[in-house]
Image: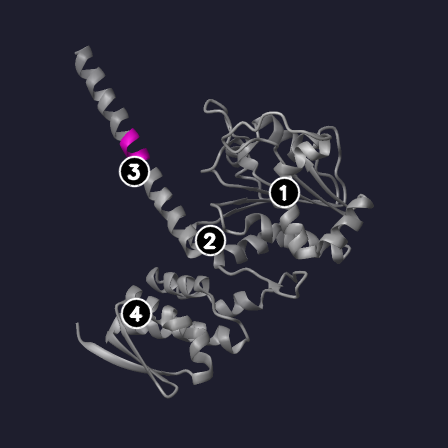
Amino acid sequence: MSMIAQELEISEEQEQNIFGQYDSFLKKVERALHVEVISRNGTVLVQGEQKNVSGAMEVFAKLKHLADRGNTITEQNVDYAISLCLTDNHQVDLIELDKNVICHNINGKPIKPKTEGQRQYIQNIRDKMIVFGIGPAGTGKTYLAMAMAITAFKNNEVNRIILTRPAIEAGEKLGFLPGDLQSKIDPYLRPLYDALYEIMGAETFLKNQEKGLIEVAPLAYMRGRTLDNAFIILDEAQNTTPAQMKMFLTRIGFGSKAIITGDLTQKDLPPDAVSGLDVALMVLKNLDEIGFSRLTSLDVVRHPLVQKIVAAYDRYEERKARAKNHDNKSGKRNRSGSAR
């Protein structure tokens, strides 16, 4: 294929933001899209094969638009813009994503979806009474749901926020924990507290908690209750049993909204136990009133290495599943041969 060159105007003031420290973002675009980028006096020259140059120009244009809106460009922005280009996902508009502000955290920083998967998840929460947010670590499932809950609470759309998760160890036995009941369950609920403190602030959270307007509790505490006019988040739902999941879903009353988040690849249940999240996804999949958002490694917004780790584990699970299917088929053929 023939080599071409195209130019893009990026002011010298914007270059450090868009190109990154020591041109780290620029070099990432060069490596990913196999182009050469030369910057001189506010003009960026991109050279390479036509398709690659077009992709790089699109990436830089998206990043420039974000910078024009006052954003500090992050590695996640660059990686996502590149991934959209490589997957020919040109219809995703990063500017529309950037405009979709949910609320601001305690430091005034806007909280907004950073990927198309996150945007669809937020829209599902707005439109549906019950939403399942399924995806790997780092995709913002709980954090965005928490932002939506706090926004609904501040706007008087609900009277209270209820946050819950199953109290189960992550693959290790913690043994006896000292202190009263609250001290024993707090370690399991710490991730929910962390998100609340960051978005709402510790002082505001504690005031509302004392009034009973915000409740953070283990899933077992939900039994026997009817939760009206509340925004309810069930976190780590992959660690529920089918009975627990049914119990939770049947607590939801009038004027309430429930978000169930989970990662199907990180179950801490005993090996022979069935996950309530697996059962719920199968049983409820045809109910129009319930929304299902499936986030992927493309929606990871933590450190870029987390995205690579998630993708590596996905490939490993796929290989393991293929090998298991192959062994099962081989076993069936051997048994049928022995029968003859």
Residue 319 numbered tag = 3
104 on left or right of 286: right
**Which secondary structure, mark 1?**
helix
Image marks 2 and 4: residues in contact by CB distance under 8 Å: no
Q: Quadrant of residue 123?
A: bottom right
In this view, the mark in front (4 or 3): 4
**Screen quadrant of the N terminus:** bottom left
Most prominent secondary structure in the magenta stretch?
helix
Q: Quadrant of residue 184?
A: top right
What is the span of residues highlighted in magenta in the rendered image?
320-324
Marks 4 and 1, the one that precedes in the sequence = 4
Residue 323 in the image: state x and y as whole percent. 27, 32
**Which secondary structure, mark 2?**
loop
Q: Is residue 322 magenta?
A: yes
Residue 178 in the image: state x and y as whole percent. 67, 29
Asked whether 273 or 203 is in front, the reply is 203
Q: Is residue 201 above or below residue 6?
A: above
The amino acid at mark 2 is Val
Asked whether 99 or 194 is in front, the reply is 194
Marks 2 and 1, the one that precedes in the sequence = 1
**Which secondary structure, mark 3?**
helix
